[in-house]
Image (cartoon, rainbow, N blue to C red):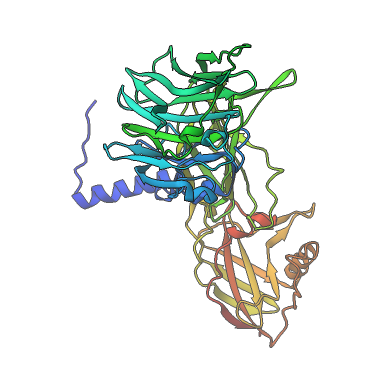
Amino acid sequence: MRRAWLKLAPWNKCFITALVSAAILAEEGSLPETLQRKVFVAADPFFWQQSENLELVHHNGKPAIRLERKFDPAPPFDDVVLDFDQPGLMRNPAHQSLLVSQNLIRRATTTLSKHAGQFSLPQHGIRLLLPDYLHFSGNDSISGDFSFFCEIEPESADATLLYRENFFAGRQFLFSIVLRNNRVIVQLENLLYAHAKETEYFENLTLRSMDKIRSRKRNQLLLTYREAEGKIALYLNGREQASQILPRDTKRHFVLRLSPLKKAPLLLFSPYRGYADNVIFTNRLLLPQDAPDFGALKPYGDRYQQRTGRFFSKIFDFGYSQSYLVRIDATKEQTNENALELGFRCTDRRYDPGTDTTHLPIQPLHKAAGMRCRFVQLSALFRSDNAGETSPLLKKVVIEFRPNPPPARPQKLKILSVQNETLEAEIQPNNEPDVINGGRYMLYYGHVRYKPEGAVYFRDFNSSGEGIPIAHAAPFRIKVNNDTLAKNKQWADQDPRFKLRYPLFSKGIGFYFWITACDNAWSTAEEHSDHCSLPSEAVFARFD
């Protein structure tokens, strides 16, 4: 079999390629350039319409949403808390005057809370005075219950976390918490006091942690003193490391006395290299589970409950009903132990400020492809691991959609004749695929341009009373008489949205005529009314 080859000029090749492309697009019914892509990063206000227990952090230099690390419940305002979230460092602004000096760098972190203090130079540190009502201040002759808590992320094996020293009556009085070879050492010099038979006894105490500090990772350190038992306990990362019960017998009854340190300044994190956050001085007896977390499981009767975080985003309007949702994709980080449940809800109605969206079901993101709607709203549920140590991260969400705009404005109506109370006109149809495949035209008339007094929605009605729309043809003619107007009026009177006066055609009376084109997404439902084009140029005609 012989093969025949056709040699084409370059312009002919382009012309044939254009025809093939146009044929494919007409078959698909949409243009590829109509695909739109909207990217929402975590810092976008779009996500923060309604949220709880969430915070914005920077992860690897990019914004991310995660669960908020916080105390359950929050510390009372009487506690002295340095959370570093504000430039004043103090959680309670009334405690700002307690800061004698501060030399550090506030940094946004992902491993600690929103902000933490960074200590990297030899001169960095915090000098602090404690209010008299705190037992740790030394205002009382016998110290009562107290707790000291802090979160640290050290970068060196040796450091000083807390140091308070004074010399009185030829004695050295010292309270210090230091790191030595990544182990925590608590040292009390001459602070254990007993008085018997006019003899004073001073004893020392040293507590050493069994576990080592995790370098460059978050560590939680807690030191408590229970005065009724005389017990001093050291906790590290939720485990009790060491404890000491003060000797109390009939001969010597030791108590902890911090009064010799009353006038001594309290020095924090000097020398120290690393990060620190959530430093707490309180008269309460804290427990390791009182430390801030992302939402650890808490016992509640015979069950457990967990603090979760969630948000509902703002409304993202596609602009037109029956828009095609291609996909919703999220960039996130999670493990097998924590969870991030993302969903969406949408509807085909236009969103108004008073619209109630709570009745719309939340659907998983994988069901978004192929849905047709007017707007979309995102939701997310964050859950940490059981211990509250890790949180999932949401970095960005991408929404791809094809908006479904109304057809282009049709060409001017061509009047062929207006006689015998009959209008005959020719319509130059739109060549858009969604008008060709299932679209329609509507003819309007009135005594004033673009103020309709009547409309022809259907060119005729069948025996069962169903209207036959003015469908696509290329080109085509239409005849309208008073009988056509009467049938359309009967149909329009059933819906107030379409009800008009419908003046009859009569000799000597002139009207303006114009048409609109509607695509295949149009229906009598109000939410689909945005699928008709702008009116064509109005044409005047007077009946003979």
Q: Residue at x 39, y 39 (%)?
A: 117
Extreme residue toward the bottom, this view: 508
Image quadrant in which the C terminus is located: bottom right
Looking at the rendering, which quadrant does residue 121 occupy? top left
Q: Position of residue 539 (x, y in %)?
A: 56, 79
Q: Position of residue 429 (x, y in %)?
A: 51, 62
Extreme residue toward the front, this view: 198
Q: Is residue 108 left or right of residue 78?
A: left
Q: Is residue 154 left or right of residue 376?
A: left
Residue nearer the viewer, 460 or 383: 383
Residue nearer the viewer, 302 or 160: 160
Q: Residue at x 49, y 26 (%)?
A: 390
Q: Position of residue 275 (x, y in %)?
A: 37, 33
Looking at the rendering, which quadrant does residue 228 occupy? top right
Residue 69, visible in the rendered structure: no
Residue nearer the viewer, 75 or 204: 204
Residue nearer the viewer, 293 or 522: 293
Q: Residue at x 58, y 66 (%)?
A: 516
Q: Position of residue 246 (x, y in %)?
A: 56, 15
Residue 21, visible in the rendered structure: yes
